[in-house]
Image (spheres, rainbow, N blue to C red):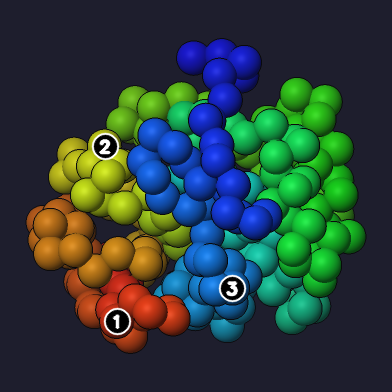
Amino acid sequence: MTSDQRPHLSWRGNVPIATRFEDPYFSLEDGLSETEHVFLKGNGLPERFCDGFRIAELGFGTGLNFLAAWAAWLACNQPGTLRFTSFELYPMAAEDMGRALAVFPALAVLAAPLLGARAAGKLSFCAPGIELEIVEGDARDTVAGWQGVADAWFLDGFSPARNPELWEPMLLSDVARHTAEAGTAATYSAAGAVRRALAAAGFEVERRTGYGRKRHMTVARMA
């Protein structure tokens, strides 16, 4: 896998659509509010933040989830460093990320160094209080070989019906193996197969109210 491979996109306004999966990268209603509801609140953040807190993510996409987590970290004045690792098969080009993120002006200051790093072809960067690493490749391989563990997982692949590879039981088992004691996971998906796979991997699974038009979402805690 090389960084020259890019996702094929169409656009609905400034929301990118992955043409391979016919699925938007974030909510057409309000992507930032969706991220805060599903991935932050779903993982009990920012209340759980502490120095060295580790977030891992399936699907970096536009970087919106990363920026929202970074903004939440800064807003709670937590000393130390937040570490964020994301597994992404097709990293998005900086210009496409910039177009998508432009609709979230509250994140503009934080987006600038991310976009600068991506424009330079980098898959990682550090700034005061934050460390980001994007692991390029098929998550079914890269998560299994990862040496780290996460305190919280953002499970943000495209719809399980359209992108089943990121929801396979073996991959979710690898997610569990790379989850710290009492670690958590959250996803917008409430698909029964996803909840069963998380439970089989060792998580305690709970269905909660979803964001916007989605009636339900899933949160999980390592048993």
In the rendered view, tell whether residue 87 sits above or below residue 149: above
Q: Residue 165 carries which label?
A: 2
> Left or right of 33: which side holds 79?
right
Q: Which residue is drawn at 53% across and 30% down?
A: 7
The residue singled out by tag 3 in the image is 30
User: How many tags in the picture?
Assistant: 3
Q: Quadrant of residue 197?
A: bottom left
Q: Residue at x 57, y 83 (%)?
A: 47
The residue singled out by tag 1 in the image is 215
Q: How crowded is mark 1: few (under 14 residues within 10 Å), some or many (20 or more)?
A: few
Residue type, mark 1 in image:
Arg
In the rendered view, tell whether residue 74 sits above or below residue 3: below
Do residues under tags 3 and 1 come within 8 Å of each other at their CB atoms? no
**Disc 3 or 1, which lies upstream in sequence?**
3
Which of 78 and 29 lies nearest the eye of the viewer? Answer: 29
Quadrant occupied by the C terminus: bottom left
Residue type, mark 3 in image:
Asp
> Left or right of 215: which side holds 155?
right
- Image coordinates for residue 10, horizontal then vertical, percent: 55, 41
**Disc 2 or 1, which lies upstream in sequence?**
2
